[in-house]
């Protein structure tokens, strides 16, 4: 069974910092409702600025939001189900981790789901979807030019979402989103080698061209190659120091 997600902001910042999570949450307004609290907790964990293993102190989070412990615990239960938080009876709640094997598994799962979505999306996409996809690639190009690889991570996800969203299958899109979220805190595109990033970016452009031409066969062939290279690339991250000896990324 796949464990919960890890969160690695930077290889140089490996020690979990309890204040990093709380600092993000304190920047938000107090007194939010249940759904807004869940959204803010999720956003903080997915930001890439909170180390794996960081404690989530229920009382302190409750004080920040101006609520009781109950809505905080309910939100954390949801995040446990999403793979973003771990809970141990004595240790309490922590931002979750992934082993290298689990990380690779999630990319395999994501590839299968995205291929299914692309297969349907290419036939149902319209002019508005084309515009969204073109704009998403433009933002990717800008991130590459600026060498802003945190932005590249963010815009890469937006580009993939632009190509898969036209499948009009909400449950499938939701499953893809959940898998993305579990790996998102690691910010893999910010840590891979530049030549790998260049290769993947070139495939993004090829995917867009096939999508705009409504060439399903070519799109799926490129997408499969892209997913295979992604899987290979993220597998290489296990040898870079991003994952510690205990299996979790960025700790120690």
Image: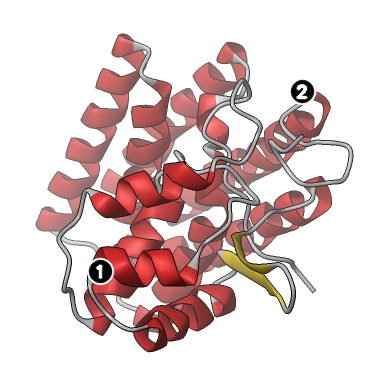
Determine crowd level at label 2: few under 14, some 14-19, many 20+ residues with C-alpha closer than 10 A: few
Q: Mark number for residue 240?
A: 2
Residue 143 visible in the displayed image: yes
Front of the two marks 1 and 2: 1
Q: Do the residues labelled 1 and 2 touch (CB within 8 Å)?
A: no
Quadrant containing the N terminus is bottom right
Residue occupying image coordinates x 35% and y 80%: 170
Q: Position of residue 140 (x, y in %)?
A: 31, 28
Residue occupying image coordinates x 50% and y 57%: 180
Quadrant containing the C terminus is top right
103, 166: nearer the viewer: 103
Residue occupying image coordinates x 79% and y 46%: 100
Q: What element carries label 2?
A: loop
Q: Which of marks 1 and 2 is nearer the N terminus?
A: 1
Q: Name the residue under label 1.
A: 65
Q: Mark number for residue 218?
A: none
Residue occupying image coordinates x 40% and y 78%: 72
Q: Is residue 246 left or right of residue 130?
A: right
């Amino acid at each position: 069974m796949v464990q919960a997600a890890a969160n690695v902001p930077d290889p140089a910042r490996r020690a979990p910092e309890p204040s990093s999570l709380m600092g993000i949450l304190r920047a938000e307004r107090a007194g939010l409702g249940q759904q807004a609290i869940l959204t803010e907790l999720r956003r903080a964990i997915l930001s890439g600025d909170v180390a794996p293993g960081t404690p989530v102190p229920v009382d302190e989070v409750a004080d920040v939001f101006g609520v009781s412990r109950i809505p905080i615990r309910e939100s954390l239960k949801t995040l446990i189900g999403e793979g973003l938080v771990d809970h141990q009876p004595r240790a309490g709640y922590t931002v979750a981790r992934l082993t290298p094997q689990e990380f690779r598994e999630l990319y395999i799962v994501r590839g299968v789901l995205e291929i299914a979505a692309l297969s349907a999306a290419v036939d149902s996409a319209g002019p508005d979807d084309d515009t969204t996809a073109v704009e998403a690639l433009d933002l990717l190009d800008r991130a590459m030019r600026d060498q802003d690889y945190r932005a590249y991570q963010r815009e890469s996800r937006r580009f993939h979402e632009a190509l898969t969203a036209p499948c009009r299958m909400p449950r499938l899109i939701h499953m893809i989103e959940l898998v993305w979220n579990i790996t998102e805190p690691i910010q893999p595109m910010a840590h891979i080698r530049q030549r790998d990033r260049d290769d993947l970016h070139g495939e993004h452009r090829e995917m867009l061209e096939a999508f705009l031409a409504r060439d399903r066969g070519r799109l799926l062939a490129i997408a499969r190659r892209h997913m295979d290279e992604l899987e290979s690339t993220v597998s290489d991250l296990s040898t870079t120091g991003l994952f510690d000896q205990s299996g979790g990324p960025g700790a120690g």
